[in-house]
Image (tube, helix red, strand yellow):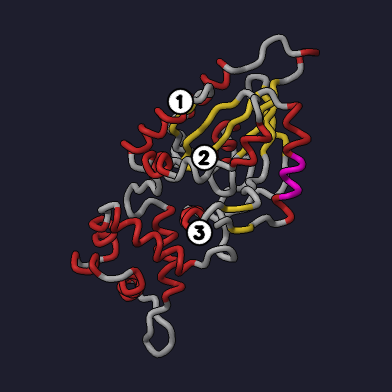
Amino acid sequence: MEKSWYPGLMAREERRLKENIKYIDLVLEVLDARLPMTSRNYRLQKLLGSKKRLVILNKADLAEINLTGRWLEILAREKWPVLAFNARKMSGLNRLEKLMVQNKPRNLQYRRSSRLMVVGIPNVGKSTIINRLVRRFAVRTGERAGITRGSQWIRLRDGWEMLDTPGFLPPYIKSNVNAKALAAIGCIDFKVVDEERTAKWLLKKIIARRKFSSLAKYYSLSEEDANKNPAKLLDEIGVSRGCFKKGGRVDRTKAAQLLLRDFRRGELGRLSLEKPEDYEET
């Protein structure tokens, strides 16, 4: 079942991107390494067409190393270069800049600057990557989706001009599972999928992937808690962190917000939310 989701801002930015793409020489397509296929906008693929691009699996420091390696192999089957990246610590920056040089257009008319565009869905780290390339704080960043509010040109070194674009999702999210996964990594806000449902889904994923020990250690849980249903487990996390309402009841919304924040920051260890075989089965 497809879930409708398309705010006016995203519709406007899609139109602008369609207008600007003809002026661009090279595209940086940014995906989340924990969710490479689901964080890829299928409408964006159609808009880009055969435009030359580099594919970046950002936030690789938060994803499982072996799975990221497998995703790199799969994406490398396309004709575009692909690399894992950690924008927070500049890991992979030299490799990215070398690929940009290798794919820089030659013999540009009027000797104009080479034009680069950075694209991707909200909160995959586009702005952080731009700041790394510029070597300064050029655009706002944050954990909340939708920080970038409008397209802007930024001048880089070595004869590049870069167009930063706000992230936009396709008008339909293909399933409720995809919506929860995107909400878990912060790509859609909780008007689409609320925090508690997203947190419960994430807890199921953690247990299914046998990653409970990291969760138990961080929140001082017992191994027996792994047998509890997600709602009860969320209660235990709330108790551990003092998330209570008046009267002493656990505030599950606050507990869910806490869990999701800690997951996004990597406090619960590396966790990829999709595997190649999951994608291949669909």
Label total for image = 3
Quadrant including the N terminus: bottom right
Residue for badge 1 = 76
Query: In the rendered image of this protein, does residue 235 appear above or below residue 279?
Result: below
**As shown in the figure, which amino acid type bears the numbered disc 3?**
Asn
- Asked if residue 12 shows in the view, the reply is yes
Q: Residue at x 52, y 55 (%)?
A: 175
Q: Which residue is drawn at 67% across and 41% down?
A: 165
10 Å neighbourhood of mark 1: few (<14), some, or many (≥20)?
some
Residue for badge 2 = 31
Q: Which quadrant would residue 248 be assigned to in this image?
A: bottom left
Alpha carbon separation for disc pair 1 and 3: 29 Å
Magenta segment includes 13: yes
Query: In the rendered image of this protein, does residue 236 appear above or below residue 73?
Result: below
The percent coordinates of residue 108 (x first, y second) are 74, 13
Q: Magenta residues?
A: 11-16
Task: Looking at the picture, tell me which residue is in the foreground, 177 or 51.
Answer: 177
Question: Which structural element holds mark 2?
Answer: strand
Task: Looking at the picture, tell me which residue is in the foreground, 130 or 234.
Answer: 234
